[in-house]
Amino acid sequence: MDTHPTSGRPGTLWWLLPVLVLVCGLVVTLLIAPRSQAPVQALTQDLSRAHHDQLSRALVEQATDVLAAARELTARGPATDADSFNRQATSLLAEFPEVAGVELLTTIGHAQRPMVERQLSEQTGQFVRFARWTGTRDTQAAEPADHYLVIRQGVFQPDTGPGVSGLGLVATSVPHWRDALRLARREDRPAATTVTELERNGGQQRALRVFIPFPENESSNDADLLALVIRPDHWLEHQLAALHDSRWQVEIHDISQHARQPLAALPAANPPASDVPATRSTLTLANRQWMLSTRPAGEWLDSLREQALWPAWLTGLAVTLLAAALTAWACWQLIVHKRLLRRRSIRARKLGQQLDNTRVEKNILHHSLQESDRRARDLIELGAGIFAELDEGRHIGYLSPQAATLLDIPSTELVGTPLDALFADDEQRELAMTFDAARRDQGIQRLDTELTTRSGQLLPVTLRAKTLRDPLSGCAGFRVTLTPR
């Protein structure tokens, strides 16, 4: 098969087709591969929603249990002494370690203020006065009033410190506690505050409080309240310790505060993804609405995307390379066949030209042969002697018309008869010797002899014989002229 070009037209243009297929395949792969992220996005959302729902149910159930236990504690009525309250509060804190502390709020008359301040000072080992809250980390002595709703007692978890920062604080002096206090007193149900920072009595505390009123018929003073002290970060960590997955970041926001900073957060193993919306739901703690937010970690999400993206790219590249290879093979076959067809076309044109030349030569030779044949016939007819063709046995195959004139015998009667029959018997031996010499020497032999006419007369003639050559036998016959002398 010929693989070399036979014309001046370049074959490089055909090789642009597999290159075009390769480029198109890469472009299509580039466009389609990102679509493999859609299942990853859906899977991430499903996993995030399932994990989020699990966390939300756990937080709601635990908050409900804590409030139910606190309501059960308040249903027993206010403790008769500090030890009794300490035992009840310690039992509650042991059952719910996510609660930082339990405080007792009591309404104190102005006449009891010195006695209660002295008791608080003895309890904490430092001078404690009734104080009003004036800022995040600033308190002042409470101004004289008929009644004070103060934090009288407090029991806290061992890991949170003594919890003395709130003792002696007039609860109504904290602006963002007033609505919760009013709601708890008026509607007789738990009410929660926002996060408050306290730094008093040598202690520091950042927590929110859930105020739970004592039943009016069981309380000696309808102003008595139980406060659950909850540190959001501590509460969230204990609540979700067994459920938190480091592939997600968990945050809790106070909806009513509209603050960008979360109340509490459980960080993920690495920074969360910024291009994926967070999964959010609302939680209720007493009267407060919180928002639980979970967001997947960026590195984990990127690994999922890569796991889906690599097969798409590899499949696209494999299909593209296969298509380009098949296209290149097809183009090569097409180029080879076109070159072969072009060469065959050129060869066919050459053969056609040669055939035309041969046909012309044949016509010329045929014309020359016809002319030569006519010339030979004319010469034979114009000659004075007889011309004959004999086979190997010297039988007459052709005899010129002069035989009828010279011998009075028609030529047609002599065809097929031996030439020896036209000679006398005494001439037979010399005649045979002449023909044998012609056959042996492959030349022209001459003999002067006499023919016998039909009437029996003798006609002196000169015989010339020439052998017709045959490649196999060496002799195919003779040509003979008989010229009168």
Image (spheres, helix red, strand yellow):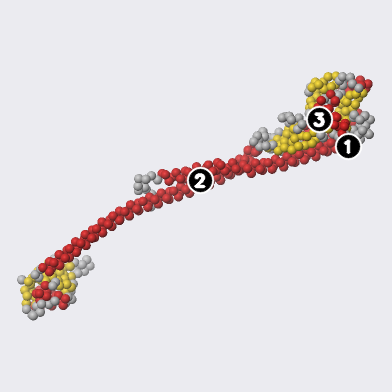
Q: Is residue 476 above or below residue 247?
A: below
The residue located at (87%, 34%) in the rendering is 187
Residue named by callout 3:
193
Residue 10 picture quarter: top left
Q: Earlier in the sequence, mark 1 or mark 3?
A: 1
- Which residue is rendered at x = 31% and y = 54% of the image? 349
Q: Nearer the viewer, residue 16 or 152?
A: 16
Q: Residue at x 47, y 43 (%)?
A: 19
Q: Identify the residue under disc 2.
A: 321
The local secondary structure at tag 1 comes to helix
Residue most toward the bottom? 455
Question: Mark 3: which amino acid?
Answer: Thr
Quadrant assignment for the C terminus: bottom left
In the picture provided, is 267 more to the left or to the right than 3?
Answer: right
Mark 3 against mark 2, which lies toward the viewer? 3
Marks 1 and 2 sit apart, C-alpha to C-alpha, by 74 Å
Q: Crowding at label 1, few (<14), some or many (≥20) Cα neighbours within 10 Å?
A: few
Res 160 label: none
